[in-house]
């Protein structure tokens, strides 16, 4: 306990430093205390008496520090100032959303000084900067994450309580920044958190979509998509930077002038940057996520407007700004494909121009006429491509170096390769992106020329190694003449110095299958970087009670060094700790039960096993296999109503791509099965099925702490990694899964006795395909499987439309079940029976939960980023804490002195 007390004291001291600049004088405090209490005209009146005590008790004292009176008064003063001067309301007319806005601005004030200080530090130290380019950043909500990383959550909570407000209610008013589709974007968000926590000088670059991933509505079991207007109430976290507007070119033609290629007569779209702060944990480092928004280069056509043609007057501006209108336009049509390619180039061009500008204005060149030395550019910049979407970085960086900075081709290519690295996230060939040459030539003619030259250079190297192998040349060509497409995955490999997969199995399969030829050409390029998750959001924020229980046993260092969780193995037989883990899990489940009742009108037994599959809906993720198991459980209960069964609540969440009809039909089937099961009185509370509408980051934060069983059941060899599996493991869930993606490494870390592995391995899948897989053989062999499929086919779950699921049956039987659900069905059911047996013994189940938490240290994004930093980017993480804003800049007694000394002031342009 002495260790915990010491840690608490340190956190308290940190909080005091962090809020010092917002505290008020003693006289001001006295004046404030003299004021009479005002009534609080909010949607829900402030709790009083026993209700207030109950509410207060629900927020336990956290490891993140005891509220200090001085800090609390400072927060209250700042909150009221923002309500008055920023929101421009008083307590008599302010709404709950106004209070949220005031709270967000109050917390942002704590970020600003540290953000500026971080920029100053990175400029002065002039170290290598890391640039992470991604089409997706699935950030979720910012408020709670910022408070936790700054160490001010308890002070803010206490201040709002004294003002008669509930922090948890206000947090619900924040819109999720859903600028991502799933794991890819959420991984990018976790990585930004870890880069800041590890003290790296880093930027995230993405697009500021007006509408994020769609809002999912489930109507009669069907998915409906409505726009996700996440900006409709404004975004208090972003800062626009119009001074760094960047022109991005499209179309035009290429001419030769004085022996040089020149891209002319282009259409220009302006890229407007919006910056969002990314705080590190307790180190005063605030990095930046810069998102680009498309803006028309000129105003609307005033002549057309005056002539009464109002629509055409603004049409050009509207069409221009469509580039960042929506995340992932439907690319089933040529217009959608063109828009998608425009989005990808818009991100790449704006970001690389910004990166080059920052390099040219870095410390060695900012105050001199010295010409930038681009041979040193790879020593000062590392560009990481998050999947193939930013692959055009290779061609655009080449264009900028050759056409704008006048470098020779060979020199530019060498710089480009040393600067860029590529992360692959999928083994599905269709996800590599292959753009039609004619579309490419029309939209980006100069880049097609550059890619063609890169390809010729690349094929020369291939020819040197395999002189007579024309088939290999054809296979490895970036420009596929036969199909008239440009392969963006191949371009990413050829134009980078490092290529990595995101789990060991995935990386091995890349080398042996998808990129086998490229691995044989350049084996030194290929690496593995197993994905990870940030423990700040995925346990400290979403599961504070479990975090406190862990800290009571092993202290707090695990928050930034997750491998420390291995110490929990020493407490696996500690009766009090087992009881604490059980109590926390039950309380988390009870919160979900209330939500199920309120929002889905389903009564759920909190003691039932919460069996959860939350992820994007896709055939290879095999939600359909889970559904077949539900039908099997249902049939067993109906056949033997008096049998003792382990009660289960099976929870699904996830979105299907709008054009992916099979995935949407799977959602409909799950909902229909749930309708039948949930309304059958014979079943009662022994089995419930819930499909959660509009799964998103903020909903995941509520679900994951309550999970008992994590479903990770993709066909072996198809899931690159997965991160939902890691989040649930960290929060004390057991996993049922195939040996796919990161499941393989989870199995290694926790041991086979503490995870439920079933099904075919990658080798088994390959062998069965070679032998000749026949799904109908499994259908005929397994009576329970046959019965479940027949029920689906015959309309048992859809009496109003018996043939609605005909296509699902065709996929599984007539079209031979591409993802081999039927082959894995029997082993999956047996594995679920082992799950039931263990769940009956809650003590043994909880011991295995503790062992899973203890084994999850490897799956921290801090570990992943440290590996990227050392082995790909060539930078060193730092545990150095930057000075707080009120401490003044190093070597200066007062900030004002620095300004005076540097007169006349020269504006830095390295932001």
Image (cartoon, grey):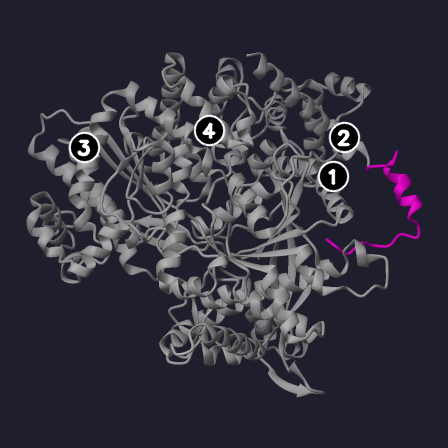
| Secondary structure predominantly adopted by residues drawn in magenta | loop
Disc 1 to disc 4: CB gap under 8 Å: no
Q: Earlier in the sequence, mark 2 or mark 3?
A: 2
Judged left or right of residue 363, residue 177 is: left
Q: Residues within 10 Å of mark 4 (few under 14, many from 20)?
A: many
Judged left or right of residue 885, residue 165 is: left
Q: Which residue is mark 2?
A: 21
State which quadrant residue 46 falls in.
top right
State which quadrant residue 897 falls in.
top right
Can see residue 297? no
Q: Is residue 505 above or below residue 598?
A: below
User: What is the number of the mark on residue 543?
Assistant: 4
Q: Residue 170 in the image: x percent, y percent?
A: 54, 34
> How many angstroms separate mark 2 from mark 4 (CA)?
30 Å
Image quarter in which the N terminus is found: top right
Q: Residues within 10 Å of mark 1 (few under 14, many from 20)?
A: some
Disc 1 to disc 2: CB gap under 8 Å: yes
Q: Residue 316 in the image: x percent, y percent?
A: 59, 74
Q: Residue 313 in the image: x percent, y percent?
A: 61, 75
């Amino acid at each position: 306990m002495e260790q915990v007390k010491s840690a608490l004291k340190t956190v308290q001291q940190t909080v005091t430093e962090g809020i010092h600049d917002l505290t008020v004088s003693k006289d001001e405090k006295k004046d404030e205390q003299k004021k009479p209490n005002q009534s609080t005209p909010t949607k829900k009146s402030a709790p009083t008496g026993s209700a207030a005590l109950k509410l207060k008790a629900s927020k336990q004292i956290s490891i993140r520090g005891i509220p200090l009176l001085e800090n609390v008064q400072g927060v209250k003063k700042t909150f009221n100032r923002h309500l008055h001067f920023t929101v421009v309301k008083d307590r008599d007319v302010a709404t709950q959303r106004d209070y949220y806005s005031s709270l967000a601005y109050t917390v942002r004030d704590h970020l600003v000084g540290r953000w500026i200080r971080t920029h100053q530090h990175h400029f002065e130290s002039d170290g290598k900067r890391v640039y992470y380019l991604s089409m997706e950043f699935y950030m979720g909500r910012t408020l709670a994450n910022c408070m936790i990383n700054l160490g001010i959550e308890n002070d803010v909570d206490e201040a709002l309580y004294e003002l008669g407000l509930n922090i948890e209610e206000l947090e619900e008013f924040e819109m999720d920044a859903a600028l991502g589709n799933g794991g890819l974007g959420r991984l990018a968000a976790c990585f930004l958190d870890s880069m800041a926590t590890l003290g790296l000088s880093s930027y995230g670059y993405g697009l500021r979509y007006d509408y994020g991933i769609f809002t999912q509505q489930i109507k009669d079991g069907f998915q409906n998509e409505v726009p996700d207007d996440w900006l409709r109430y404004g975004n208090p976290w972003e800062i626009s930077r119009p001074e760094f507007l960047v022109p991005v070119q499209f179309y035009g033609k290429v001419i030769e002038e004085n022996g040089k290629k020149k891209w002319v007569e282009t259409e220009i779209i302006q890229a407007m940057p919006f910056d969002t702060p990314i705080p590190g944990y307790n180190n005063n480092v605030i990095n930046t996520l810069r998102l680009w928004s498309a803006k028309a280069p000129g105003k609307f056509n005033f002549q057309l407007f005056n002539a009464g043609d109002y629509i055409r007057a603004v049409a050009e501006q509207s069409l221009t700004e469509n580039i960042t209108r929506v995340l992932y336009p439907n690319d089933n049509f040529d217009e959608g494909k063109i828009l998608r390619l425009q989005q990808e180039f818009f991100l790449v061009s704006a970001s690389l121009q910004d990166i080059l500008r920052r390099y040219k204005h870095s410390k060695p060149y900012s105050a001199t006429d010295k010409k930038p030395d681009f041979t040193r550019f790879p020593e000062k910049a590392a560009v990481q491509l998050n999947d193939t979407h930013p692959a055009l970085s290779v061609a655009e960086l080449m264009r900028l170096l050759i056409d704008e900075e006048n470098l020779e081709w060979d020199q530019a290519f060498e710089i480009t390769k040393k600067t860029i690295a590529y992360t692959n996230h999928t083994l599905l060939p269709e996800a590599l992106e292959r753009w039609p040459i004619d579309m490419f030539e029309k939209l980006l003619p100069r880049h097609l020329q550059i890619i063609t030259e890169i390809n010729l250079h690349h094929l020369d190297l291939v020819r040197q190694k395999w002189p007579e192998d024309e088939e290999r040349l054809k296979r490895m060509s970036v420009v596929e003449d036969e199909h008239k497409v440009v392969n963006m995955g191949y371009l990413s490999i050829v134009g980078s110095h490092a290529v990595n997969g995101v789990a060991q199995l995935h990386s091995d399969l890349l080398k042996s299958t998808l990129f086998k030829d490229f691995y044989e050409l350049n084996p030194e390029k290929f690496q593995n970087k197993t994905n990870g998750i940030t423990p700040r959001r995925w346990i400290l924020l979403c599961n504070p009670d479990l975090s406190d229980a862990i800290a009571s046993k092993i202290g707090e260092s695990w928050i930034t060094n997750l491998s420390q969780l291995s110490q929990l193995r020493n407490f696996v037989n500690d009766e009090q700790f087992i009881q604490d883990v059980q109590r926390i899990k039950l309380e988390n489940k009870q919160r979900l039960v209330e939500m199920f009742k309120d929002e889905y009108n389903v009564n759920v037994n909190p003691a039932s096993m919460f069996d959860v599959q939350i992820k994007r809906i896709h055939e290879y993720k095999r939600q359909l296999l889970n559904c077949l198991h539900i039908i099997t459980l249902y049939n067993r209960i109906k056949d033997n109503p008096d049998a003792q069964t382990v009660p289960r609540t099976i929870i699904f969440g996830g979105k299907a791509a709008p054009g992916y009809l099979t995935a949407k039909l799977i959602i409909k089937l799950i909902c229909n099965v749930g309708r039948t099961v949930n309304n059958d009185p014979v079943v009662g509370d022994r089995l419930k099925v819930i499909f959660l509408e509009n799964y998103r980051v903020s909903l995941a934060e509520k679900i994951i702490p309550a999970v008992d069983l994590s479903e990770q059941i993709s066909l072996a060899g198809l899931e690159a990694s997965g991160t939902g599996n890691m989040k649930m493991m960290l929060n004390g869930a057991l996993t049922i899964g195939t040996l796919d993606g990161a499941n393989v490494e989870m199995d290694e870390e926790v041991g086979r006795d503490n995870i439920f592995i079933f099904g075919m391995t990658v080798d088994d899948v390959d062998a069965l395909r070679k032998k000749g897989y026949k799904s109908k053989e499994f259908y005929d062999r397994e009576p329970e499987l046959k019965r479940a499929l027949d029920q689906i086919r015959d309309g048992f779950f859809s009496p109003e439309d018996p043939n609605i699921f005909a296509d699902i049956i065709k996929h599984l039987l007539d079209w031979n079940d591409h993802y081999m659900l039927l082959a894995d069905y029997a082993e999956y059911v047996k594995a679920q029976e082992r799950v039931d047996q263990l769940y009956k013994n809650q003590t043994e189940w909880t011991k295995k939960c503790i062992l899973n938490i203890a084994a999850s240290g490897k799956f921290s994004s801090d570990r992943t980023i440290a590996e990227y930093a050392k082995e790909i980017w060539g930078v060193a993480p730092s545990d150095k804490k930057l000075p707080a804003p009120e401490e003044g800049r190093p070597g200066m007694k007062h900030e004002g002195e620095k300004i005076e000394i540097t007169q006349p002031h020269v504006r830095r342009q390295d932001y």
